[in-house]
Image: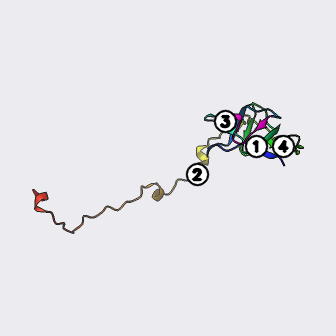
Amino acid sequence: MATPVILPQLGQTMEEATILRWLKKEGDAVKKGDVLLEVQTDKAVLEVESFASGTLLKTLAEPGETLPVLQVIGLIGQPGEKVPDVPKPPPKAIPKAEKKPAASVPSPAKAPSEAPAAALEPPVIPIAQPSERRFSISPRARR
């Protein structure tokens, strides 16, 4: 049974990565811990290691593609093993600049009614009263 190669989440804020290059090609023998590919995140270029031993049966992502994390990007299995049908992950679409309607400024006639005066006043913070408790001070501290 083929083991999927998953694009790992290499940081808490990492949401996507771009595949720079595959260091192993389809059909190459792979050992657990071998570096399979290099990915570029928004902060660094990192190497992705194999979590299984066998042969790299298929790569599902090409260099230059930007993909979300935890996506299947390849398959590792035994030589000659039948490759299961796994759909190729869609590359992340680059969002086009959306045209938003210009923010309309409300006219003075349509302005909301004035807020109540109580809402505009700063909150009252009670002032601490001096303590009537007396503290004893040592003679040395008094000097």
Residue indicated by mark 1: 53
Q: Are marks 3 and 2 in contact (CB under 8 Å)?
A: no
Task: Report the span colored magenta.
Answer: 28-39
Q: Is 137 on the left or on the right of 60, as rendered?
A: left
**Residue designated by label 4:** 78
The nearer-to-camera label among 1 and 2 is 1
Please state which of the two labelled residues, at mark 4 or mark 3, is closer to the viewer.
4
First in sequence, mark 4 or 2: give its number.
4
Q: Between marks 4 and 2, how big is the CA–CA gap? A: 71 Å
Measured Cα–Cα span from mark 3 to mark 2: 57 Å
> Which amino acid does the dot numbered 3 rest on?
Glu
Among numbered discs 3 and 2, the one appearing first in the sequence: 3
Residue 104: % across, % down: 65, 41
**Numbered label attached to residue 112:** 2
Displayed quadrant of residue 18: top right
The number of discs equals: 4
